[in-house]
Image (spheres, rainbow, N blue to C red):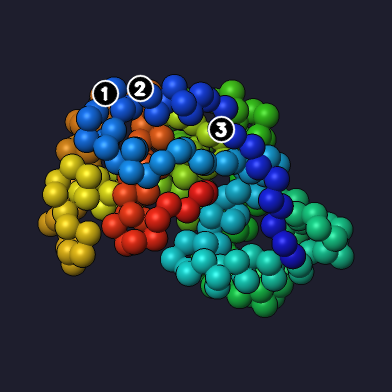
Amino acid sequence: MPEARRTHKPPYDAAEAVSALSAADPKLAKLIARAGPFTLRLPSQQSPFEALLRSILYQQLHGKAAAAIHAKLLGSFEQVSGFGKHPTAQQVLECPNEQLRAAGLSHNKALAIRDLAAKTVDGTVPSITRIKKMDDDAIIEHLTQVRGVGRWTVEMFLMFRLGRPDVLPVSDYGVRKGYALTFQGLKPDAKVTPDLLPRPEVMERRARKWAPWRSVASWYLWRACDLAAGKGVQPE
């Protein structure tokens, strides 16, 4: 079952963000110049339930394997949800365990998906209309109550579903490596060991000058990893 591809630009002025970041931090400005335009796009129609279900499935799996499990799971609901439609939280909550396991979910992921569905039904996971009115900290507080959903998962949701402009995921490996490449002299071909990556407080201290555009800065730190790997820059 193919995923929806309709996307839109983030709800903030990317040109303003890039200009402000370049003015605030000359080293970051050099990375921005090398990486090129900010090309992040957000999914146009995806509920918090749908986005978090996908995130849980993709945790600790290679992209192709996770995509196959995701497609198989969604396809298994076609008789109740309709062709091309995502199942509701209630439908996932009511499905037999065998259906989840047959799609390839591990025991822990099946438990996490059920908990996500239950907390969506009871309102712990807000609707997209309600969640858009909440601040970042409140969203993190609500969504991390779901089994299998940690702070990093919610930070990705804030950045890549809601388009929040000022998120700094200091535990993300790519952001940390991009920071080391950009600001700490890490060589592109170096074997990365934990001692070569920045501590959260180091990143947070420098990132004060990036506010209120730390999501955009983080996106460019991911691009630093692409450049170091010789991949060029791939649009999101």
**Where residue 40 sits in the image (x, y, percent)?**
52, 41
Q: Does the residue at mark 1 contact the one at mark 2 (Cβ under 8 Å)? A: yes
Note whether 56 is above or below 236 in the view shown.
below
**Where residue 52 sits in the image (x, y, percent)?**
57, 50
Residue at position x 59%, y 34% from top? 9
Residue topped by disc 3: 10
**Where residue 144 sits in the image (x, y, percent)?**
47, 44
Q: Check disc 2 and give the amino acid type.
A: Ala
In this rendering, the label closer to the viewer, 1 or 3: 1
| Cα gap from disc 1 to disc 3, whole angstroms | 21 Å
**Quarter assignment of residue 214:** top left
First of labels 1, 3 by sequence position? 3
Residue topped by disc 1: 24
Front-most of 134 and 9?
9
From this viewpoint, is residue 150 visible?
A: no
Q: Does the residue at mark 1 contact the one at mark 3 (Cβ under 8 Å)? A: no
Q: Check disc 1 and give the amino acid type.
A: Ala
Residue topped by disc 2: 20
Circle 3 packing at 10 Å, graded few (<14), some (14-19), many (20+), is: some
Circle 2 packing at 10 Å, graded few (<14), some (14-19), many (20+), is: some
Q: Is residue 179 left or right of residue 12?
A: left
First of labels 2, 3 by sequence position? 3
